[in-house]
Image: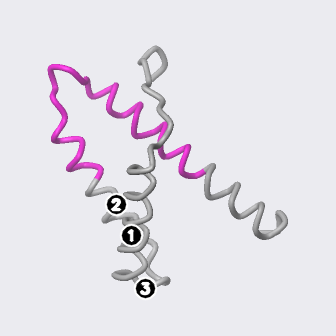
Amino acid sequence: MSGVPMKIFTPTAADQALHLDICALINRHLTPDTPDRFLAIAAQVVGQALALQDQRKMTKEMAFEIILTNIEMGNQAVISQLMNSTGGTA
């Protein structure tokens, strides 16, 4: 999907608060042994957010680029956190 412009932004305090709220909901409603359920539910939420986009302003390719870029950013954030907290032995 190269060539599709990606809007990169630094999360605001409100964005970070939302992220923490989502993590708290996950911890409250899903047991630790159900990562597949969490992944399925998160994917459904992303699908719903995708359906709400204005197709006159955002193409499917633009939306998928945002989704994929942010999946990679989330993966890297967790990997970095694990590397720092476990000394690289996770």
Q: Which residues are magenta?
A: 46-75
Real-space Cα separation, disc 2 to disc 1, in angstroms: 6 Å
User: Percent position (x, y) of residue 49?
Assistant: 23, 46
Q: Quadrant of residue 51?
A: top left
Of label 3 and label 2, which has the lower sequence position?
A: 3
Q: Which residue is mark 2?
A: 42
- The residue indicated by pointer 1 is 38
What's under tag 2, amino acid-wise? Ala
Q: Is residue 84 magenta?
A: no
- Tag shown at residue 31: 3
**Where on the picture, by quarter, is residue 88?**
bottom right
Is residue 55 one of those drawn in magenta?
A: yes
- Residue 74 position within the rendered picture, expressed as x and y whole percent measured from the top left: 53, 50
The tag earlier along the polypeptide, 3 or 1, is: 3
CB-based contact (under 8 Å), mark 3 and mark 2: no
Task: Name the chief secondary structure element in magenta.
Answer: helix
In the displayed structure image, the side of residue 1 where residue 41 appears, left or right: left
In three-dimensional space, the C-alpha distance between marks 3 and 2, rounded to whole angstroms, equals 15 Å
Q: Could you say which disc has been placed on residue 87 in the image?
A: none
Q: Residue sitting at 37 percent across and 58 percent down?
A: 18
In the image, residue 44 above or below residue 26: above
Q: Dot 2, how many residues are within 10 Å of its Cα: few (below 14), some (14-19), or many (20+)?
A: few
Helix, strand or loop status at disc 1: helix
As measured in the structure, the alpha-carbon distance from the residue carrying label 3 to the one carrying label 1 is 9 Å
